[in-house]
Amino acid sequence: MAHSMGFIIVLSLLALAPLCFSGKTFGGGFLYPQFYYLSCPKAQEIVKYVVAKAVAKDPRMAASLLRLHFHDCFVKGCDASILLDSSGTIISEKMSNPNRDSARGFEVLDEIKAALEEECPHTVSCADIMALAARDSTVLTGGPSWEVLLGRRDSRDASLSGSNNNIPAPNNTFQTILTKFKLQGLDIVDLVALSGSHTIGNARCTSFRQRLYNQSGNGQPDDTLDQSYAAQLRTNCPRSGGDQNLFFLDFVSPIPFDNSYFKNLLAYKGLLNSDQVLLTKNALSMELVKIYAYNQELFFLQFAKSMIKMGNISPLTGYKGEIRENCSKVNAY
């Protein structure tokens, strides 16, 4: 009975989730899909072309561009602050714990920006480029599409502390992760759906080593990790050394964007602690994991909704911020 009630509650939450978040955004401002129709009609075409070329050369790039958008939006909103290099009073978010040695794809965004500056100078923001690149990366790997709301402007500062504190970490507890999502105006449905982006991409040994050797400080591996899978992981993730060794987040189908991530969680083969706790630490998130594992269409639908919602976190609009000429530095006035 309890299981049935949980399932009903989950379906109710999914049904109530709005399909479109156009209009006023979380944190103020207005975004809309047609923002560049007149000022830069080829903007989306240019972004898609460069992203497709980059992903064809390096399939991992799709996950990297998707991750950059996520790590940007969780710090001061979707304002491309993550792209700024250290300069003057700016301390780059690239130096934060979640980004250092792992954030990548900056050169792809720079190529997109250069092409757009040639096509329509001083028009398309780096923040909007990131939102479009995240959508295109998802589609190119077989995932869902959505209409990207546009009109974000770029920040003139960054927040190293925000990057260190606001972005969920692989070893965070379920409640800590959920709290970080709620602080951004996102809910538990968004948390589980957006975690599904781990169907593509890689993680470093250092981000899950504790699960293999000392999860609770007692010298024992994580008992929510399938032990045969753990044994495989140990072969290339030793107790010490190999910190940067890469592992597929979804070892079953690492390249296509699908729902096998959730099927892995049901088999207790989630790579990161922050993945597996979706099944083991909360009844509602557990139901969502099961639903998405059995229904890829429903996962795709909710992922698109949640990406739109995340992309609307506290954008700079109107006369706030600027349109950077170079995504890695603020404009000189």
Image (tube, rainbow, N blue to C red):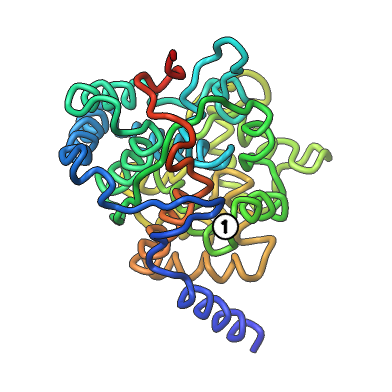
Q: Residue at x 46, y 56 (%)?
A: 309
Quadrant location of the N terminus in the rendered image:
bottom right
Secondary structure of the residue carrying tag 1 is: loop
Residue denoted by label 1: 186
As drawn, the residue found furthest toward the right would be: 218
- Against 185, is 314 above or below? above
User: In the rendered image, which quarter is residue 119 located in?
Assistant: top left
Q: Residue at x 44, y 37 (%)?
A: 319
Where residue 317 appears, as percent x and y from the top left, is 44, 42
Where residue 307 appears, as percent x and y from the top left, is 42, 53
Where residue 186 appears, as percent x and y from the top left, is 57, 57
Q: Residue at x 65, y 52 (%)?
A: 183
Quadrant location of the C terminus in the rendered image:
top left
Badge 1 crowding class, 10 Å Cα cut-off, few under 14, some 14 to 19, many 20 or more, is some
- Against 176, is 106 above or below? above
Where residue 117 appears, as percent x and y from the top left, is 24, 23
- Against 291, is 56 above or below? above
Amino acid of disc 1: Leu
Q: Nearer the viewer, residue 298 or 145?
A: 145
Tell me: 40 left or right of 152.
left
From this viewpoint, is residue 242 visible?
no
Label count reads: 1
Q: Residue at x 24, y 25 (%)?
A: 121
From this viewpoint, is residue 293 visible?
yes
As drawn, the residue found furthest toward the top would be: 88
Tell me: 182 left or right of 34.
right
As drawn, the residue found furthest toward the bottom would be: 1
User: In the rendered image, which quarter is residue 281 located in?
Assistant: bottom right
